[in-house]
Amino acid sequence: MTKIICVGFQKTGTSSIAVALSRLGYTVGNPHRRVMDEMNWKSDDPYAQLKQIMLEVLAENDAVEDTPSAFFHREMDEAFPGSKFILTRRKTENWLRSFTRFFSDKFNGPRIWMYGVDRLTGNEKAICKVYEDKNQEIIDYFKDRPDDFLILDLENGDGWLKLVTFLGEDFLKPFPHENKGMSGWRSKANQRRIFVITRIFYVITIIVLLAIWANQ
């Protein structure tokens, strides 16, 4: 099955995208949990183990999001050709503000590996550079593949329409049509109405989620 891979940094709306994909019927894996439980950070180069975790989590699910996905876009693209990649991003200063509020000053293993520093205070410029450079690296990598790559900026109003349009009919789960020939509420006309109502429900849900996320 073709995969959906979210390569945005934490605090860019990755949790909201995970909820959105789940509501569309996809299983969404989170490698960060396994990274925290299984990684041996004393090894000379954790890359091989991180890569293995990333690919295993993706293989077991329809989609993947969260740390350290942003650092393995090439590897996941090679392992699962034809996948769809979504980069969630926001203005650097807004991202850093949210990052600072959410995470402790002292970094854990994954963040030390990603940002090359052991704490937040005094390293803000270096952390922001990693964030900006990695985002640009991902954009450059997919620059000639618009059908495979989407940038979502939830702060600026990106949402259901942009996401569903990008995924397209081949990625959306087929709408269930039971006993198509029956009249009444199971008729084709009523099924279309149900489909429209369901889409409206999705839009309302994501607006609420974005409002909650914006206030975090």
Image: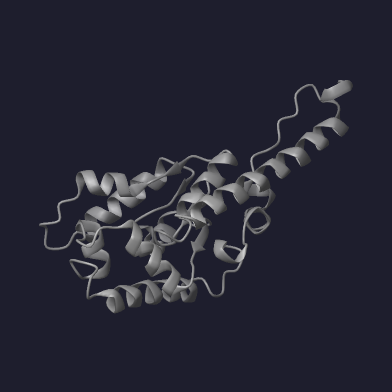
141 relative position to 146: left or right: left
Q: Is residue 163 left or right of residue 112?
A: right
Q: Could one spot residue 30 in this view of the protein? A: yes
The residue under the point 19% across, 50% down is 39
Q: Quadrant of residue 166?
A: bottom right
Q: Position of residue 12 (x, y in %)?
A: 46, 61
Residue 182 in the image, given as x and y percentages of width and height: 86, 20
Q: Residue at x 21, y 64 (%)?
A: 112
Which quadrant of the figure contains the C terminus? bottom left
Picture coordinates of residue 97, whole percent (x, y) = 39, 67
Q: Which residue is located at x 30 percent, y 73 percent?
A: 127
Q: Quadrant of residue 104?
A: bottom left
- Identity of the residue furthest to the front in this view: 215
Structure colour scheme:
one colour
User: As rendered, which of 216 and 69 lies closer to the eye?
Assistant: 216
The count of marks equals 0
Is residue 152 visible in the rendered image? The answer is: no
**Viewer-nearest residue: 65 or 209:** 209
Side (left or right) of 62 relative to 207: left
Measured from the top left, where is residue 156 in percent x and y?
60, 66
Compared with 15, 175 (above or below) is above
Determine whether 97 is above or below 175 in the image. below
Nearer to the camera, 180 or 13? 13
Q: Which residue is nearer to you in this view: 90 or 162?
A: 90
Residue at 34% in and 48% down: 31
